[in-house]
Amino acid sequence: MRVLYDLKNDYLRMKKKTIWILVFFILLLACLIKVGISHPKEKEKSSKKESIKKVNGFVAKPSLLINEITVSGSLLAFEEVELRNEVAGRVVKVNLPEGKFVRKGTLLVKLFDDDLQAGLRKYKSQLDIQKQILKRQSELLKVNGISQNDYEATGLQVNSLIADIEEQKAQIRKTEVLAPFDGVIGLRNISVGAIVSSSTPVATIRSESHLKLDFFIPEKYGSAIKKGMKVKFSLSGNDKQYDATVLATERGISEDTRNLKARAVVNSKSEDLIPGAFANVTLRLGENKTALVIPTQAIIPQENEKQVIVAKKGKAHFIFVKTGIRKAAGIEITEGIQPGDTIITNGVLFLKEGSKLLYSKVNDRL
């Protein structure tokens, strides 16, 4: 009987222990289920908090916008000629003071012309003889001592010799290279005794009283360039500004580059202005005192249109806009926004229509 009693007690204790274990596991399972349900909600709440990203805003307000374009150009001497002789021959005299000023008409180069001078003296002697014969025949003609035909034939000889003399003088002038205008001689390429042809460059002469500025303008701005228009330019590696006045335009668009060539006269004087130098030319085409200019990065390009994100009541709204003049840091908006609108300038790719906005900072200056 004692054994049966002990077995019964052991059974009751095991049963009670099993029940407690079951209760423990049920409670543990309930806790896990509760945590599993509440955890996604907490994640969802935290993700919502994280989805509201901080953005920068820009308040659009009217400002002065100067419509300027910068194009490339080159400085040129107002007058520049590469000196060449007209005929071939041997150089007998050189008067090319390198880097110095010479007056118009100064003899710079002389070629050998002894044969031409001898021919000129021959024609002059023949002319003197024919003139004397013509004078005697005119006296004889008065007394009918000579026919009219003989007198006129002698007169023809005189006129022919005069023409030959003028032709000979012209040939002699071709052996001379004269300064075509007042200017400064460059580096000479010949010496006395050299045999030169008409294609041999002798030297270069440039006028230094004025300089020209040639530049090219895109086709769409061609109509804005007028004679007398003021332009500014600077040299490569130098920020100093110089002035020039438009002289004329080519009046025809280049088919290769679709640009219009223009020429201006340089008004400034400086030793830094050297013919052939590269220039950055700035042209002011107009100004707008009430332009709305926003940062360039605020623009969202579409296939055929452009958008910006405007903040309204703390939410993002996508607005289609039309743009105008583009600058380095900003772009003009001609349609779509109003003065005072706040434009989102960063994080635009992560925003959607109606997204809540949290500002990091708001500016009103570019």
Image (spheres, helix red, strand yellow):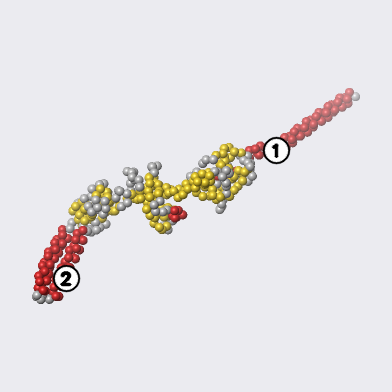
Amino acid, disc 1: Lys
Mark 2: give few (<14), some (14-19) or many (20+) Cα within 10 Å: some
Residue occupied by mark 1? 41
What percent of the width, then of the height, locates residue 26? 78, 33
Give the quarter of the image for residue 272: top left
Residue occupied by mark 2? 156
What percent of the width, then of the height, locates residue 25? 77, 32
Kindly report which numbered mark, 1 or 2, lies closer to the viewer in this rendering: 2
> Relative to residue 154, is residue 183 drawn left or right?
right
From the viewer's perspective, is residue 210 above or below residue 149? above
Q: Is mark 2 on a helix, strand or loop?
A: helix
What percent of the width, then of the height, locates residue 234? 39, 45
Asked if the residue under mark 2 is in contact with the one under mark 1, i.e. CB atoms within 8 Å, the reply is: no
Give the quarter of the image for residue 39: top right
Q: Is mark 1 on a helix, strand or loop?
A: helix
Say which label, 1 or 2, has the lower sequence index: 1
From the viewer's perspective, is residue 298 above or below residue 91? above
- Residue located at (12% from left, 76% from top): 147
Judged from this view, the residue extending furthest toward the front is 142
> Relative to residue 298, is residue 190 drawn left or right?
left
Q: In which quarter of the image is the N terminus?
A: top right
- Residue located at (62% from left, 43% from top): 312
